[in-house]
Image: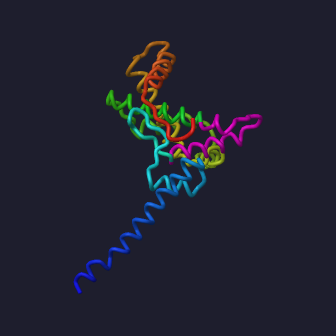
């Protein structure tokens, strides 16, 4: 009798494992074979951390990659007379995500942090004199599909981080921004990058 009870949960556990493995494989098929950025695979990639690219052993998730692809498509659809192929969109997104990953690594090496108040200060300076914040929120939604928090995370934060790194490395030299741009490209060129998506 105890043997029968002991094994009664085994089929349920096996069924759960089969379903989980099936979901992982289904997601891998959609992400890596069909290169899908639809909501099903984007949602699945938020649960299962499929990598899009690895930069110096740090993974950039497929969820970030696919969200940025959708954002870039949306932004370009609002631009008249701009014709960009899917390959160019993928390349732009990957280049940006790789640059951001390298910036984060450089900041970690130098113990440079970006604080919320710094992001907010730059954001407020950028929108000063523009439409009320509700209008800005609508504009961001229309252009990028983002709310202000997502815009701050994806655009303002990397901008602040790059400025802090520029100042830390080149102090207040007149051509610091240009020198840092060259330095960043050199860092990217020497980074160990493994692509899991087309590039």
Whether the magenta-drawn stretch holds residue 107 is answered as no
Q: Which residues are magenta?
A: 63-90
Residue 198 position, x and y percent, is: 57, 38
Residue lying furthest right in this view? Answer: 81
Total numbered labels placed on residues in the image: 0
Residue at 47 percent of width and 36 percent of height: 157
For residue 184, side relative to residue 198 (left or right): left
- Residue 103 higher or lower than 151, as above or below: above
The image quarter in which residue 93 lies: top right
Observer-nearest of 161 and 65 = 65
For residue 151, side relative to residue 87 (left or right): left
- Residue 172 higher or lower than 41, as above or below: above
Residue lying furthest top in this view? Answer: 174
Observer-nearest of 85 and 129 = 85
The colour scheme is rainbow
Whether the magenta-drawn stretch holds residue 77 is answered as yes
Residue 96 position, x and y percent, is: 53, 33
Residue at 32 percent of width and 79 percent of height: 8
Residue 138 position, x and y percent, is: 63, 49
Q: Quadrant of the C terminus?
A: top right
Residue lying furthest bottom in this view? Answer: 1
Main SS, magenta region, reads helix
The image quarter in which residue 68 lies: top right
Observer-nearest of 198 and 107 = 198
For residue 143, side relative to residue 10 (left or right): right
Q: Quadrant of the N terminus?
A: bottom left
- Residue 182 higher or lower than 45, as above or below: above
Observer-nearest of 177 and 136 = 177
Residue 67 position, x and y percent, is: 56, 47
């Amino acid at each position: 009798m105890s043997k029968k009870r002991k094994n009664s949960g085994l089929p349920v556990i096996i069924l759960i494992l089969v379903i989980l493995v099936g979901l992982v494989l289904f997601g891998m098929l959609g992400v890596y074979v069909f290169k899908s950025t639809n909501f099903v695979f984007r949602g699945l990639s938020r649960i299962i951390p499929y990598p899009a690219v690895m930069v110096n052993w740090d993974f950039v998730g497929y969820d970030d990659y696919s969200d940025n692809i959708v954002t870039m498509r949306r932004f370009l659809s609002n631009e008249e007379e701009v014709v960009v192929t899917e390959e160019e969109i993928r390349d732009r997104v990957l280049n940006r995500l790789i640059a951001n990953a390298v910036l984060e690594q450089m900041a970690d090496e130098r113990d440079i942090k970006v604080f919320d108040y710094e992001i907010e200060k730059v954001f407020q300076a950028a929108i000063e004199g523009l439409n009320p914040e509700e209008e800005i929120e609508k504009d961001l939604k229309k252009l990028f599909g983002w709310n202000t928090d997502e815009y701050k995370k994806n655009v303002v934060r990397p901008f602040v981080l790059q400025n802090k790194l520029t100042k830390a490395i080149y102090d207040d030299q007149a051509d610091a921004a240009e020198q840092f741009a060259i330095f960043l490209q050199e860092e990217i060129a020497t980074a160990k990058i493994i692509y899991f998506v087309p590039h």
